[in-house]
Image (spheres, grey):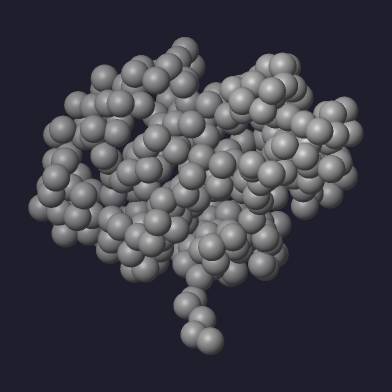
Amino acid sequence: MEALAESLGAPPYRGRQLAQWIFVKGVSDLDAMTDLPRDFRAALAARTSVGVPEVERRTPSQDGSQKLVLRYGDGARVQAVLMPDGDRLTLCVSTQVGCGFACAFCYTGTMGLERNLSAGEIVAQVMVAREGLAAGLRITHIVYMGMGEPLANYTATVKSLRLLTDPQAFAFSPRRITVSTVGLVTGIERLAKENLRVNLAVSLHATSNEIRDRIMPVNRGFAIEELLAACRRFPLPFRQRMTFEYVLLEHGIRATIRWSKGEDIGAACGQLREATVTV
């Protein structure tokens, strides 16, 4: 933002003001940014645009969750999910339109990968979800568990994480952000060096390579042994834990059932896909 301001002949602090308007106040209309000089706003309008997706549909669940169907300027659609739990309000964000990893139990994976989202398109989901909240409510946690594999869209994911945790932007605590992965070992190893201090969740779903190869094709490239070794090397800040996600597909096993949110509206884990409409 500072570099953009300077390229338009304005001092760097105008870039910081612009960031405050967009990320903190959630304002996307340049004309509404009244403390920016009129000529600077005109220069911005001529060179840039502040694009946020349209909320095409908002579907409430019996458990209080809401599924947001968001349409970007090129017509691409993704879904984000708001999940209340006591005094917590978690937003599940997407990082790709679709997903190319084809996990056997995931509905999103059946649509394939259409394209990556940019860092701006990822954080715009936070802006749109925040804008629609009732008075007094705020998003407290963010999980990268929507459509797509975050570490397969690595650069945009990391940039969005830096925006979300930057004190001058969204100012979320890293402890309140979780990134989920199917187990891309190279991505986990890169993320370990970023010093982002966010939580990591790993979709495991099997204890043998034979089964995981069958239900999660990614395992053919990164076996369980490699994945667990990368997890052991991942730096965790004090009192932070890594989560392993596991869908129980075997019969006759006594287990505690995870409280799933948004299932009745197709917004639970692995259900995010929008039907194709032919005009």
- Along the horizontal axis of the image, is 260 left or right of 167? left
Q: Is residue 249 above or below residue 174?
A: below
Q: Position of residue 180 (x, y in %)?
A: 41, 41
Which residue: 43% across, 25% down? 241
Above or below for 144 versus 251: above
Residue 234 image position (x, y, % from top left): 32, 22
Position of residue 277 measured from the top left corner of the image (x, y, whole percent):
51, 81
Query: Residue at left 48%, top 17%?
Result: 239
In the image, taking residue 213 as reference, residue 233 lies left or right, namely right
Q: Depth check: 41 or 117 in front?
A: 41
Residue at 59% across, 60% down:
73
At a point 84% along the width and 29% down the height, the residue shown is: 37
* Quarter holding residue 61: bottom right
Between residues 211 and 277, which one lies in front from this camera angle?
Answer: 277
Q: Nearer the viewer, residue 231 or 218?
A: 218
Quadrant where the image shows the N terminus? top right
Q: Where does residue 111 sit, x and y in percent of width and height?
A: 37, 68
Q: Which image quarter: residue 267?
A: bottom right
> In screen coordinates, is 247 left or right of 69?
left
Q: Looking at the rendering, which quadrant does residue 39 occupy?
A: top right
Residue 124 in view, yes or no: yes
Is residue 1 in sight in this rendering? no
Of 222 and 171, the residue lying toward us: 171
Residue 156 vs 234, above or below: the answer is below
